[in-house]
Amino acid sequence: MKKEDKENQNEIAEQKLMAQSTVNDLVDNQIKGDSIAEDLIVLLGATDENFDNPLTRELEHQYDTLTGDKLKQLKASVKHELQTRIKMPIVQRELLDTVAEPERHKKFKLTVKKVKSGMIGSEEFPMFTSDDLGKFKVIITPSKKTEDKTFEEELLKLMDKHGQTVADVRIFCDNFAGE
């Protein structure tokens, strides 16, 4: 057996082991993700009238006590892991849907945010005061879905995109109808 063939076989064997490990990690992460989703449903479901719950209080505590790399890691985890998990459809549906409004998760979104000065006294967040500054709160906001545009709005946008005028479109339609 040539040396190159043996190296190729070793490389293939390493890649196979890496693939197996990756698949196992994916399965483990899914199991952990499901568990985290269930925990988030419980914790966020315990939100009180001040938009607080055990999760928000723990986040505040850790933000106040951690420093350096651990604080950076926590911030990254909140931004990339926690917020992503909160946005999971199962979490949103479980927390937002009610008997009175079963499709509420399509109209609103739930998230956890740290209250910033711009939020205090704003129209969007009238419930927050200066006492809430820097604290984590559970927030429910309307989904920012784009409203359906009319045919005319879409046509004007398309005409603008291609540099066409109403006259150009009329000529095109007349010629197209004659074919």
Image (cartoon, rainbow, N blue to C red):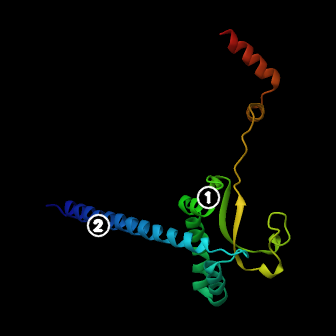
Sequence-first disc among 2 and 1: 2
Q: Quadrant of residue 67?
A: bottom right
Q: Which residue lies most toward the top here?
A: 178
Mark 2 element type:
helix
Q: CA distance from mark 2 to mark 1?
A: 44 Å
**Percent coordinates x, y for residue 125 in the rendering:** 80, 67
**Percent coordinates x, y for residue 85 in the rendering:** 55, 66
How many numbered callouts? Answer: 2
Q: Which residue is mark 2?
A: 17
Q: Which residue lies most toward the bottom here?
A: 65
Task: Give the amino acid at mark 2.
Answer: Leu
Task: Give the amino acid at mark 1.
Answer: Asp
Residue 133 or residue 103, whichever sits in front: 103
Residue 158 or residue 1, whichever sits in front: 158
Residue 4 or residue 175, whichever sits in front: 175
Q: Quadrant of residue 117?
A: bottom right
Whether residues under marks 2 and 1 lie with C-beta atoms below 8 angstroms apart, the answer is: no
Quarter of the picture containing the C terminus is top right
Q: Which residue is mark 1?
A: 97
**Percent coordinates x, y for residue 171 in the rendering:** 77, 16
Q: Residue at x 64, y 90 (%)?
A: 65
Above or below for 103 versus 176: below
Q: Residue at x 33, y 66 (%)?
A: 18
Q: Residue at x 77, y 31 (%)?
A: 152
Left or right position of 150 against 92? right
Left or right position of 47 against 20? right
> Callout 1 environment at 10 Å: few (<14), some (14 to 19), or many (20+)?
some
Q: Quadrant of residue 99?
A: bottom right
Quarter of the picture containing the N terminus is bottom left
